[in-house]
Structure formats: structure tokens, C-alpha cells
Image (cartoon, rainbow, N blue to C red):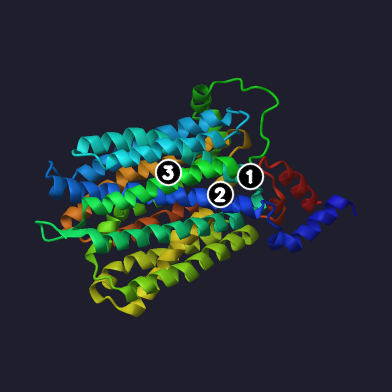
């Protein structure tokens, strides 16, 4: 028996126990960077909207209309679609003594400053310019680098667990972000002329100030702390970054990467759902009769169940594949979203616990599995570019989701619980599309795969023998 065949047989038994080779300090930094991005994004998607709906509308008294939030969100998505692709393609062929992807993290300084300037806005169109153009360009430079680092720094068989740990660390920032918002809302809310409570200008100031300082500090810190692999190509690129982009959409390349484009389509449908309710999520929380008991229950469930679900599914999808755990998680989580209208009417504590646990399968479980599955399908030489192409699934959905959400918001008089219920059905609608994507870890051999995929065929040939 050759050593290679022996390796295959051992791997079949030990596949779920393949160790994570990425150092813990690097996982911590990647998680912190992702957390800073999530923290920044939650404020950009949330407080930017409450600033328009509350501060500009009532405190400053500038012109306001219901279409302002959907319009700004849509164009912000368009800029993300363009510049995630541009920065990703450009960084694929960018190499310097400071690193491969890391220099793009410094764009977080500009994005942070632009968020501070948002506080000085006295009209919607100035808000629109800062969010869509300045933040849209520079924040996506950071995102393009961040999204490319994990697939470049990990092996295929460990990605589920690495992504789970990164998501847990990132989730802690989400809890902090939500806690700060609830605290600011309690300290700085005001009753407007429409009878609703809104966060005032001072509350926005503290939230945005903290976010900017945190984001700038972490992006700069990760620039110095993250250790990138040596990926400088032996031969220079034959095409410029914009020619590389155009070539990726030619028929031959589409056919070559068909599984990747399948998962983009499936993810696009899936990502329509959160955009139906996320632009109004902070307004949803302010309208609920939330007390300290509800906050403690929600935080406790998120800390223990949410992180546990993420870590468990990360290990499970490394051991048993991506497709089945993903589909089951979507089915379970969708039920939770459909129960939200009933929860807001009854405010039953047992139902609250059930709904939160169910929803966490989508909020915590799906990103871990889907991120790993998508990273498996990225071509090694074009990770940044295809990460940008994958962003299509996170931007085009905004054009669809936010307008659906806007119409539901208008028809229900701002009852966002129905936005979340409809989102549950949209999540379910993505399942048939995920079923069309091939499994990347269908055999134990795939657990040994490196980013370029070359060991897979060799080991599978040995298995057949």
C-alpha cells in the first residue's frame, strides 16, 4: 500500500478532525476586522436612515419624503457593486512591500472621516453624496481586501471552522452595536410631531463618533497585524484589471466558473430577504415595548445559542459538506421570521425565545456555511475579482429588497413585523437555487484540498483505485 493510498484511508476516518492551521492570532484579527466592518455597516445602514427620517425631517426641518431611504440605499448598493469589483480586480495584481491586500485596509481612514462629516449634513442630497460616493468608494476598498483575505489564508477543509470563529468575533461587535443603539435611544430619543419616538442629533453624534474611531483604529491595526501569505505571481499579469474584469464575463469563463455563478444567483435571491426589513430595523426596535428583561433574554440567547450554532455548523459543514446544513438552516430560520408578527402582538416570553433561536440559524449559521461554500469556488488567481463579482449577490438584491420593503412599510403604516414575515418566504424561495449548486466537500478527499484544488483530483483518483 502506497503512502498516498494510506493517507486517503486515514483521511476518510479523520476528516472531521483535520486541524485548523491558521494561527489563532490571525483568526482573531480577521474576526475583529470583520466585526469592525459589521459595526460600521450597521450604523451606515441604520443610523444614516434614522438621521434622515428623524433628524433631517423633524429637528432640522428639511424636505423629507418616504422614498429617500430606498433611493439612497439603492445607489449605495450600486456603488458597492462597482467598486467591490474594481478594488478586488485591482488588488489581485497589486503587490508592495506593505502587502498584497493589506494596503487597501487604510481606506478605512477616509471612510471613517466621511461618516463624521455626515453629521454636518443639513439636506438629504449632502447625505446622499457622502454615503453613496465617498463611503461607497472607500468602504468597499476595505471590504474587498477583507473578503479576499480569508480564502487566501485558509485551506478548504478548515474554512467552515475558521469562518465560524470569525463570525463569532464579528457577532460580538454586533451585540455591542445594538447595545449602544438601545442605550442611545433611551438617553437621546424625542417624540416627533407624528407621535413616534426618534433618535435625536446628539444621539447620532455619539453613535457615529464611536463607530468612526473604532473603525479607523481596527483597520489601521489590522494593516500592521495581519500576516498575508506570499502570493506574488512568478510572471507579471498579461492584462490590466479592467480587461481582467471584462474577460471574466465572456462565455468561456462563465462556463468554466459555472458553479460559482450558480451560487451567486442563489445568494442573490437569499439576500433580497434581509433588505426587506434591515433599513428600518432600528425603527422597529424603538417602536417595541422593550424592557430590560427582553434585552437580557435576547442578549443571552444570542451569546450562547447564536455563537454555539455558528461554531457547530462551521464544524459540521467541514465534516459533512456545505449544501445540506445550509438548506436545513434556511428552513429553520424562515419559520422564525414568519412568527415575528405574532410575537409583536403577544409579546410572549416563550415565543420570544423560540423566535430568536430559530432566526439565529439564518443570522449566524447561514453566513458561516455560505461564506465557506462561496470561498471554495473562488479561482485562486482571481480571488479579489471574483469576490467583487460575488458582491453582485449583496448589492443587486438591495434594489429589489429595499423597494419591496418600502412598499410594505407604506401599506402597513410602518409595521416592520410584516416586512420580516415576508422576508421569511423570500429566504425559502432561495432553496431551489442552492440545490442546483454542486457540493464542494462531497468526498473526504476534498478536505485535503488547497486553494488551487490540485490535490483533489489526485486523491479522488486514488480513492477510485
Residue 6 visible to an observer of this rendering: yes
Mark linked to residue 405: none
Q: Nearer the viewer, residue 404 or 32?
A: 32
Q: Which secondary structure, mark 2?
A: helix
Residue beneath disc 1: 153
Tell whether 390 sits left or right of 113: right
First in sequence: mark 3 vs mark 2: 2
Q: Which secondary structure, mark 1?
A: helix
Residue beneath disc 2: 30
Tell whether 11 sits left or right of 371: right
- Badge 3: how crowded within 10 Å, few (<14), some, or many (20+)? many
**Which of the 4 image quadrants contains residue 422?**
bottom left
- The reply to whether the C-beta atoms of the residues labelled 1 and 2 are less than 8 Å apart is yes
**Which of the 4 image quadrants contains residue 184?**
bottom left
User: What residue lies at 36% left-to-right and 45% top-to-bottom?
Assistant: 397
Q: Which secondary structure, mark 3?
A: helix
Q: Nearer the viewer, mark 1 or mark 2?
A: 2
First in sequence: mark 3 vs mark 1: 1
Q: CA distance from mark 1 to mark 2?
A: 10 Å
Residue 389 visible to an observer of this rendering: no
Q: Nearer the viewer, residue 444 or 389?
A: 389
> Eyeballing the image, is 134 above or below 180?
above
Tell whether 182 sits left or right of 319: left
Question: Whole-percent x and y of residue 150?
Answer: 58, 46
Residue beneath disc 3: 393
Question: Whole-percent x and y of residue 366?
Answer: 48, 58
- Badge 2: how crowded within 10 Å, few (<14), some, or many (20+)? many
Q: Nearer the viewer, residue 207 or 337?
A: 207
Q: CA distance from mark 3 to mark 2?
A: 22 Å
Amino acid at each position: 500500500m502506497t503512502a498516498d493510498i494510506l493517507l486517503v484511508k486515514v483521511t476518510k476516518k479523520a476528516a472531521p478532525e483535520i486541524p485548523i492551521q491558521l494561527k489563532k492570532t490571525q483568526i482573531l484579527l480577521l474576526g475583529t476586522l470583520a466585526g469592525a466592518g459589521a459595526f460600521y455597516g450597521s450604523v451606515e445602514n441604520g443610523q444614516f436612515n434614522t438621521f434622515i427620517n428623524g433628524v433631517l425631517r423633524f429637528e432640522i426641518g428639511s424636505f423629507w419624503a418616504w422614498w429617500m431611504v430606498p433611493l439612497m440605499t439603492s445607489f449605495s448598493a450600486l456603488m458597492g457593486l462597482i467598486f467591490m469589483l474594481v478594488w478586488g480586480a485591482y488588488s489581485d495584481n497589486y503587490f508592495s512591500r506593505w502587502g498584497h491586500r493589506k494596503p487597501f485596509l487604510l481606506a478605512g481612514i477616509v471612510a471613517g472621516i466621511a461618516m463624521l462629516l455626515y453629521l454636518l449634513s443639513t439636506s438629504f442630497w449632502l447625505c446622499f453624496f457622502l454615503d453613496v460616493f465617498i463611503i461607497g468608494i472607500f468602504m468597499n476598498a476595505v471590504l474587498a481586501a477583507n473578503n479576499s483575505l480569508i480564502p487566501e489564508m485558509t485551506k478548504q477543509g478548515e474554512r467552515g471552522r475558521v469562518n465560524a470563529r470569525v463570525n463569532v468575533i464579528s457577532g460580538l461587535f454586533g451585540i455591542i452595536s445594538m447595545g449602544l443603539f438601545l442605550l442611545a435611544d433611551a438617553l437621546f430619543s424625542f417624540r416627533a410631531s407624528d407621535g413616534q419616538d426618534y433618535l435625536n442629533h446628539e444621539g447620532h453624534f455619539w453613535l457615529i463618533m464611536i463607530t468612526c474611531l473604532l473603525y479607523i483604529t481596527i483597520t489601521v491595526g489590522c494593516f500592521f497585524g495581519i500576516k498575508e501569505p506570499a502570493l506574488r505571481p512568478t510572471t507579471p499579469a498579461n492584462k490590466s484589471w479592467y480587461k481582467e474584469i471584462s474577460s471574466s464575463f465572456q462565455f468561456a469563463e462563465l462556463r468554466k466558473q459555472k458553479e460559482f455563478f450558480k451560487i451567486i444567483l442563489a445568494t442573490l435571491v437569499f439576500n433580497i430577504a434581509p433588505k426587506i426589513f434591515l433599513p428600518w430595523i432600528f425603527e422597529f426596535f424603538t417602536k417595541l415595548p422593550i424592557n430590560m428583561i427582553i434585552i437580557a433574554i435576547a442578549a443571552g440567547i444570542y451569546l450562547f445559542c447564536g455563537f454555539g450554532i455558528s461554531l457547530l455548523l462551521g464544524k459540521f459543514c467541514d465534516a459533512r459538506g456545505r449544501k445540506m446544513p445550509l438548506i436545513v438552516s434556511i428552513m429553520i430560520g424562515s419559520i422564525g421570521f414568519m412568527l415575528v408578527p405574532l410575537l409583536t402582538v403577544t409579546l410572549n416570553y416563550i415565543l420570544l425565545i423560540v423566535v430568536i433561536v430559530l432566526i439565529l440559524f439564518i443570522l449566524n449559521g447561514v453566513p458561516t456555511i455560505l461564506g465557506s461554500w462561496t470561498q471554495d469556488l473562488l479561482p485562486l488567481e482571481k480571488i479579489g475579482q471574483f469576490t467583487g463579482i460575488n458582491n453582485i449577490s449583496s448589492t443587486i438584491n438591495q434594489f429589489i429588497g429595499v423597494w419591496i420593503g418600502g412598499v410594505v412599510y407604506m401599506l402597513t403604516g410602518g409595521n416592520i413585523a410584516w416586512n420580516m414575515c415576508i422576508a421569511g418566504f423570500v429566504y425559502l424561495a432561495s432553496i431551489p437555487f442552492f440545490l442546483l449548486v454542486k457540493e464542494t466537500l462531497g468526498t473526504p478527499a476534498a478536505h485535503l484540498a488547497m486553494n488551487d484544488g490540485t490535490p483533489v483530483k489526485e486523491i479522488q483518483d486514488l480513492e477510485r483505485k
